[in-house]
Image (cartoon, rainbow, N blue to C red):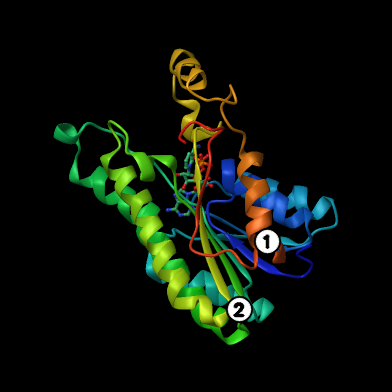
Amino acid sequence: MLAEQVALITGASRGIGRAIALALAREGAIVYINYKSNRAAAEEVKRQITERGGRADCLQADVSSAGEVDAMVQQILEREGRIDILVNNAGINRDNLIIRMKDEEWHQVIETNLNSAYYCLRAVARPMMKQRRGKVINISSVVGLHGNVGQINYAAAKAGIIGLTKSAAKELSSRGIMVNAIAPGYIVTDMTERLSSEIKEQVAAQIPLGRLGKPEDIANLAVFLAGSGSDYLTGQVIAVDGGMFM
Ligand SMILES: NC(=O)c1ccc[n+]([C@@H]2O[C@H](COP(=O)([O-])OP(=O)(O)OC[C@H]3O[C@@H](n4cnc5c(N)ncnc54)[C@H](OP(=O)(O)O)[C@@H]3O)[C@@H](O)[C@H]2O)c1
């Protein structure tokens, strides 16, 4: 149970972040739903949580901006006086082959998928250190472990998340802060919706469990990593990919 624990989930208006927000709220956490532009979707997540008797609120911020992240975390601290769980989930892809990739596509992905995690971690580190407790969950990707054609920017950002996770785990463990990463495989969300059904079938054929993942498959692990059942677990990267890479 995560009763009364304060959680910030970046990019929680849709997809994996949304599923994590709903799952943490179900366990009793007070959930802050960050989003960039999709206010209606974020409000819908909040509605679903409060309807079931949970506590949640939406916070708009572009997590690729350090200033916006600091202001968002400050707002949570002013309201709650603490922050227990950070899920660095917000992410985008701008796929292209190396020779066609535009600098803008490279920078957008690094800023949104990697810099954001650093800004959020830095903002919560001090309050978590004072509390002598915290759980940080970074959403990487199997692409960060194995690479992928057309995703040099995305793979670099997701591999960066792994280095950030391990370094932060070492640096913060003495203060009771655990930092782990989840590396999802192919999960059905808006991000993968663009793939043709032919590609989806090809991908599913390579997955021992025979299907693409659901956002809830990731949320189940996030709940475990946020709770006390994982108190002896830090600096790990756990793939949730139906056995695709092993
Ligand atoms: N889907 C997969 O197969 C898969 C696999 C491996 C890893 N992942 C990772 O899992 C995470 C979630 O992916 P998803 O598939 O759930 O994506 P999604 O459905 O496209 O949702 C992305 C979320 O991130 C938010 N976001 C994007 N840029 C942001 C920014 N600058 N500031 C704040 N929020 C921002 C979006 O907010 P708005 O609604 O306001 O736009 C939305 O809530 C990402 O880090 C992704 O790389 C996904």
Name the image quarter holding residue 74.
bottom right
Q: How many numbered circles are shown?
A: 2
Picture coordinates of residue 61 (x, y %)?
A: 49, 60
| Residue beneath disc 2 | 77
For mark 1, what is the residue?
57
Camera-nearest residue between 130 and 239: 239
Seen in the image, is 82 located left or right of residue 238?
A: right
- Mark 1 is surrounded, within 10 Å at the Cα level, by few (under 14), some (14 to 19) or many (20 or more) other residues, namely some
Image location of residue 37, percent across then percent down: 50, 49
Which mark, residue 231?
A: none
Q: Is residue 162 above or below residue 67?
A: above
Furthest-left residue in view?
A: 99
- Which is nearer the N-term, disc 2 or disc 1? 1
Give left or right: position of 138 versus 164. Answer: right
Q: Depth-wise, is mark 2 or mark 1 nearer the camera?
A: 2
- Distance, label 2 to label 1, CA atoms, is 13 Å
**Residue 113 appears at what percent x and percent y?**
39, 52
64 versus 245 height, above or below: below
Which corner quadrant of the image does residue 58 belong to?
bottom right
Check disc 1 and give the amino acid type. Answer: Asp
**Horizontal arrangement in the rendering, residue 193 relative to residue 12 (left or right):** left
Residue at the spot 58% in from the left edge and 51% down from the top edge: 12
Q: Residue furthest top?
A: 198
